[in-house]
Image (cartoon, coloured by chain):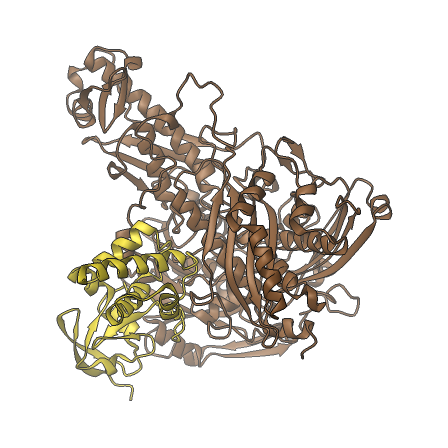
Chain colours: A brown, B yellow
Amino acid sequence: MTITSANPEILSELDRPNSYIGKTVPRPNLERLMQGRGLYVSDMELPRMGQVVFLRSPHAHAKIIGIDAAAARRVPGVIAVVTGKELADVITPWVGVLSHLKGLKSAPQHAIAIDRVCWQGEAVAAIVATSRAVAEDAAEVVRVEYEELEAVTDMRTALDPATPVIHSALGDNLAFERNHDAGEVDAAFAGSDEVVEADFIFGRHTGVTLEPRSVVADWNVAEERLTIYQGTQAPHMVQNIAALHLGLQEQQVRVVCKDVGGSFGIKVHIYADEMATYALSKLLRRPVKFVADRVESFNTDIHARDHRCKGRIGVKRDGTITAFEIDDLTGIGPYSMYPRTSAIEANQVVNLVGGPYVMKNYRARARVVFQNKNVMCQYRAVGHPIACSVTEGLVDLAAAKIAMDPVEIRRRNLIADDGYPCTSPSGLRFELLSHHAAMNKLMAMMDYDALRAEQAALRAKKVHRGIGIASFIEVTNPSAAFYGVGGARISSQDGVAVRLDAQGSVICQTSITEQGQGSESLTAQIVGSVLGVSMERVRVILGDTDNTPYGGGTWASRGAGIGGEAALQAAKILRRNILDVAAAILQSSPAELDIAGSAIVNGSDGAPRMELRELARIVYFRPDTLPPGTQPELMATRHFVPREYPFAFTNGVQASWLEVDTDTGFVKLLRHWVVEDCGTLINPQLVDEQIRGGVVQGLGAALFEKCVYDERGQLTNANMADYLVPMSGEMPDIDVGHVVSPTSETELGAKGAGEAGTAGAAAAVANAVNDALRPLGAVITEIPLTPQVILTALGRI
Amino acid sequence: MTAPVSISLDVNGERVDALVLPRLNLADFLREQLQLTGTHVGCEHGVCGACTVRVNGEIVRSCLMLAVQAHGAAVQTIEGLSDSGEVADLQAAFRDRNALQCGFCTPGMLMAAQDLLKQEARPDRDRIREHLSGNYCRCTGYQAIIDAVETTARARGGRRV
């Protein structure tokens, strides 16, 4: 598939000769980060700043009988010790529900627990001191009397009548349930030649951003303004929520987001301890800094993916998939997270299972239950890895059952590339996907047939290698259908303002944010391309609610597709304005002029007519020389949100090639391939690196990462030595290829790419492990695929 | 043992005299007392490598070393290596290859990579992966970093020959 203009006679902005769009250019401002001269929130210091340490519950579920902080208050350097009850005078509690997720319920959550703690790690008091070390010393002498309560930890029994109800006012531990039934599922299964079932188990894991969550809150009592410096993906959301719960107007709150040390969805939420930090600053009338330590990160950063999903697939002898059925159960901790809620992941699983395939019969149930564990919520590729692992695991099992090659069964069922637009059985509307083109490209990249031959030859030598394939769809460019329709004040639109400064450079303010994906780069590339100026002359300002248009920020792969389109449209207006004034100065017409190389040029022959710098000089300093009535506007703002489709679905396919050591249970990753289609590629290198980074997070889930809780709700591996993440030594090289199907919802045509790697990696690995072990009769539908899991499946232990 | 201790050391070529508590680790000393915030703190127990600095020519985890242990030592941080130009080619390779996203691991990663390149002229990809396997990166998936280090090794090797 190639980009084709509807009317090739008319060149679009993207066809301009000085376009950066589609080109790999280095990201601006990397030098700062490489020299150690970035500014992360953990680096910040303000005058009179106090450091807060939260005293956290050692119990998963307990009543707070009393707190004695007298000794702590006497520790030199301690500014204040504040309990939940005291803080409640400054900040109101919240309930994490959305109205469009019908039936979703949760209980009021306080910034600091008041009467009861509901997970190990919930804060019970805040100690503010002149240094973190002093605050930690003081925390050690705070005496808290608890009455331990029975902890609800196993999601499988959370709904049993004998299990205590965590929030009695809610009646039971069921937070949310969604059922879906499309087509004739029972008849389809009855008419199948084979029906295969499996129980899929997914380990609870977490993001492990290298910089922990960090906040500096600065209440200026004289200005009656709160400035929040926070490594967040959604500054305007933080502004709204902080104002709402502190009883302020939004204009009294400024959120500034400097460099962010990793996000992945972890930093798109607002945590109780962050709310407490805002409130402490207001209460104490001074700046307060909170930087989570690593143990706190493991215990309080959102967890994700704790699912058990029964899946069933029906298949005909010729490979036709007849039906999918799933029953998904997930435990989200004691509260639905605010304001995005913890029901979205299960909802996504129900939406996405079976997504790549032509199949009309689909039944699904998702149940979301409360537990006394850390809260669970949206993390990179929300729900996608679960849905992809279940779907692709079942497809592989079906293929094995009818003795068909895994690629062949997919080719027989994937939606045809000319079959769009179409709607999935769960109601998703697909504008244009490219499953077959992607699969064909993948086969060529990995030389599938040669790999199968190599596998067979090695099997004869008792070397157990496997090939795993996983097709997937990916939700990107979310519209208001994600949160806005449910009542959350999370913007789905983004805005960009561009202006030509007095020396002919371009200043661009955007509401999308930068956490390393390249938001600054893609914005500068787009604006530079449209305006005909070099990227070096475009300065991008982001991450500041006082100084950017209102918008959603950067999550759910929306930066390029939504923020990028807003940048394109704003730059077009500015371009028109510049050409209008240029025509007036040059006694020409805008249609005869162009901008290239940071100068006004003739459209016909490209001959330079006037430097932009000169135009700006005249407009700003000698407007008296312009024709009467001319008022040039060298600033333009545009906003954008997708309207036609609620989401821009993308698609892709991944393959894993690995070796299983059947004596030790270790998996060695040998190679990994990805083909994905994110529409227009703005900077191919940045897209590839988003995909690679995403793949490695998925590989972590597949092989290493798991939050291990004991039966009392204690997280037993809350440190980086015991919680394993991928390191360079275990990771394979990852080949990335693209198919390009631009979305026609925008002129830019870009869809998102941030989730694609994570969406399919674990499924590809799991399928490859099963492919390797198939001759040995073992089938594993659980991740992480630890040596223990593999050796158990092989009957070795 | 809770009274401040006087230490003197060389940091990025500048003499530093300071009073530090015995329990203060080198990472916090560099960040909080000297405001050299390029050295990052990720895990606080020696696993992630974000706090890697050079002490007397050897790379160490500054979160595992006490500031008092650096008395009399020569300490180099990412700011020092950047200003001296020692890693300019490595940084350029990182930039060209987009071998960093959020950049939080990058100072430690550059420190560790430069350490390898000083020891070995032509490390292969496996050797680079092995040497960097004490440095977490959650953004890149490592491949771009390995590429950038490999490119730098080749370029330096070429210059030497």
Q: Is residue A246 visible?
A: no
List the single residue furthest toward the bottom.
Answer: B1
Residue A58 as seen in the image, left or right of residue A568: right
Of residues A102 and A184, which is closer to you in this image?
Answer: A184
Residue B107 seen by the camera? yes
Residue appearing at x 40%, y 65% in the figure: A291
| Front residue of this view, candidates A420 and B34 | A420
A372 left or right, relative to A549: right
Q: Nearer the viewer, residue A89 or A751?
A: A751
Query: Measuring 63% from the left and 52% from the top, which residue is drawn there?
Result: A388
- Residue A137 place in picture, x, y as percent: 39, 79
Residue A487: name its quadrant: top right
Q: Position of residue A459 (x, y in %)?
A: 62, 66
Q: Residue at x 13, y 70 (%)?
A: B14
Q: Is residue B71 left or right of residue A771?
A: left
Q: Position of residue A353 (x, y in %)?
A: 68, 48
List x then y, in percent, for residue A558.
Answer: 48, 41
Placement of the C terminus of chain A among the 4 image quadrants: bottom right
